[in-house]
Image (spheres, rainbow, N blue to C red):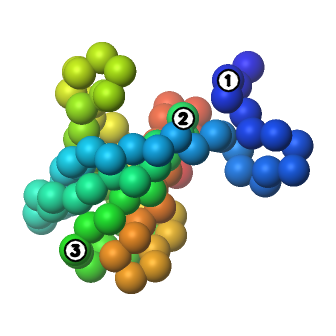
Amino acid sequence: MLLNRPGRNDKRRWHRYPLSAPIRLLTQTASIEAHGITLSEGGMCLFALANIGVGTKIQVEFTDPRSSQLVRADAEIRNRAVYLYGIEFLTAENPN
């Protein structure tokens, strides 16, 4: 069962929550500072002054705003508009 599913008229799988937090992106070759804009159960929208291609697998590090614990998650760049990135968290059920 998925929690926080959006309303029937919203085509998104998960509800987006506002986020204003520093994010670190870890690629094969770099550590990139970014800024989180929204967060959902399945991914995140973030701003990063970087050139990362769609389809690139990364790791994301950020502090959970509810628990103050450091979170590290595997993710993939799903879309990009200049410096805005949409990433999807990868799970055991969705390893892509």
Residue furthest toward the left? 30
Q: Is residue 11 visible?
A: yes
Mark 2 and mark 1 in contact? Answer it, CB < 8 Å: yes
Q: Residue at x 23, y 41 (%)?
A: 61
Q: Earlier in the sequence, mark 2 or mark 1?
A: 1
Q: Residue at x 54, y 35 (%)?
A: 41
Residue tagged 1:
3
Instruction: Name the secondary structure under disc 3.
Output: loop
Q: In the rendered image of this protein, does residue 55 appear above or below residue 81?
A: above
Instruction: Give x and y (percent) for residue 70.
Output: 21, 27
Instruction: Give x and y (percent) for residue 12.
Output: 71, 50
Instruction: Name the secondary structure under disc 1.
Output: loop
Quadrant position of residue 69: top left
Q: How many marks?
A: 3
Instruction: Name the secondary structure under disc 2.
Output: loop
Q: Toward the viewer: 70 or 93?
A: 70
Mark 3 and mark 1 in contact? Answer it, CB < 8 Å: no
Residue tagged 2:
41
Q: Amino acid at mark 1?
A: Leu
Q: Mark 2 to mark 1: distance in Å?
A: 9 Å
Q: Amino acid at mark 3?
A: Leu
Residue tagged 3:
49
Residue furthest toward the right? 8
Q: Toward the viewer: 67 or 87?
A: 67
Quadrant position of residue 94: top right
Instruction: Give x and y (percent) for residue 4.
Output: 67, 28
Quadrant occupied by the N terminus: top right
